[in-house]
Image: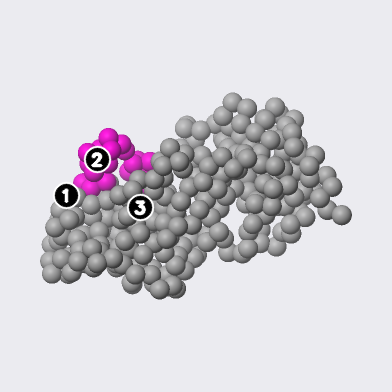
């Protein structure tokens, strides 16, 4: 996370049992509130698969006591969506119940179960036929500059007056550090780039971090062609394909067009919840275990 350390007041925590590290909470501080790190798409308390519920409760209590001692009043944690976890992982929901946490935000992710019977819409199939008639090709690239400079940056500027969350230098740094987890796929017509998708991979999931195309996307079906290639071939052995959120305004609104685009490939909704814990409520965990 150090590549964007200037944007956040990092206050990440390490939890030890004697001298053994047993949990990590990536976090940043804003005034008297600690956030599950706002620079990460998916956060929360991180621990090993062998840890038991009783230990998670003890870890969380220790965190709340510590935060209370340094005058942090609230802890806001965003959960890891279930389909990213390698093992059952609902401890946070139970802790939210025990600690009377406030559910202050829910985001809706559009996800395809690649082992399920997902169906693409007629519109997507028509786009795919257009692309196939134009003899487009998909290539995996180690150079992100063409997609960033020719497609992503101009498109975001034109449509939303915005910039990518990651600069070109930042995504190149991340790729250098995680070459097996970050992938860039571009679509070309002859030597002209038409579209691209940046993927962040985990063991079970392929997540779209960036997706963008030039103004010919309706006529060429470039994104239909690229997404279909990822679903049908490149990531067919993953369990899930994650298009990400379509929310705005802290989960209260949905970009209807963006959601339609994702669902037209067969994606359906899985939620990600954000909980607000009062650090002063740590005493509610005292008598949980009998």
Q: Residue at x 30, y 49 (%)?
A: 257
Name, please, the residue furthest toward the right.
Answer: 290
Q: Residue at x 19, y 55 (%)?
A: 217
Report, in whole angstroms, how far the alpha carbon at label 3 lies from the one at label 1: 20 Å
Density class for disc 2 (Cα within 10 Å; few <14, some 14-19, many ≥20) is: few
Label the magenta part by its dominant secondary structure.
Answer: helix
Q: Nearer the viewer, mark 2 or mark 3?
A: 3
Question: How many marks do you count on the picture?
Answer: 3
Looking at the image, is mark 2 or mark 3 earlier in the sequence?
Answer: 2
Report, in whole angstroms, how far the alpha carbon at label 2 lies from the one at label 3: 16 Å
Looking at the image, is mark 3 or mark 1 earlier in the sequence?
Answer: 1
On the question of residue 1 being in view, the answer is no
Name the spot of residue 75 as percent of width and height, x first: 64, 37
Residue situated in front as seen by the camera: 209 or 22: 209
Name the spot of residue 29 as percent of width and height, x first: 58, 32
Name the spot of residue 142 as percent of width and height, x first: 32, 57
Q: In the image, which residues are magenta?
A: 150-172
Query: What residue did someone put label 3 on?
Result: 259
Tell me if residue 108 is in the magenta stretch: no
Query: What residue did someone put label 2 on?
Result: 159
């Amino acid at each position: 996370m150090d590549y964007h350390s200037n944007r956040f007041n990092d206050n990440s925590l390490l939890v030890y049992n004697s001298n053994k590290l047993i949990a990590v909470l990536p976090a940043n501080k804003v005034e008297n509130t600690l956030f599950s790190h706002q620079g990460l798409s998916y956060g929360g308390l991180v621990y090993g698969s062998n840890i038991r519920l009783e230990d998670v409760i003890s870890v969380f209590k220790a965190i709340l006591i510590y935060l209370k001692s340094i005058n942090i009043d609230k802890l806001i944690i965003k959960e890891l969506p279930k389909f990213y976890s390698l093992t059952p992982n609902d401890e946070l929901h139970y802790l939210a119940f025990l600690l009377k946490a406030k559910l202050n935000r829910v985001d809706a992710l559009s996800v395809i179960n690649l082992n399920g019977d997902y169906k693409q819409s007629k519109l997507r199939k028509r786009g795919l036929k257009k692309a196939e008639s134009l003899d487009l090709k998909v290539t995996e690239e180690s150079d992100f500059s063409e997609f960033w400079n020719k497609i992503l940056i101009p498109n975001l500027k034109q449509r939303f007056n915005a910039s990518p969350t990651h600069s070109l230098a930042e995504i190149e740094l991340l790729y250098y550090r995680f070459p097996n987890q970050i992938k860039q796929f571009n679509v070309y017509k002859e030597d002209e780039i038409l579209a691209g998708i940046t993927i962040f991979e985990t063991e079970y999931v392929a997540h779209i971090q960036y997706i963008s195309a030039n103004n010919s996307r309706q006529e060429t079906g470039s994104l239909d062609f690229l997404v279909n290639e990822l679903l049908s071939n490149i990531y067919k052995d993953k369990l899930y394909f994650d298009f990400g959120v379509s929310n705005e305004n802290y989960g209260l609104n949905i970009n209807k067009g963006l959601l339609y685009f994702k669902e037209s490939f067969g994606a359906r909704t899985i939620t990600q919840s954000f909980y607000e814990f009062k650090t002063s409520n740590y005493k509610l965990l005292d008598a949980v275990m009998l």
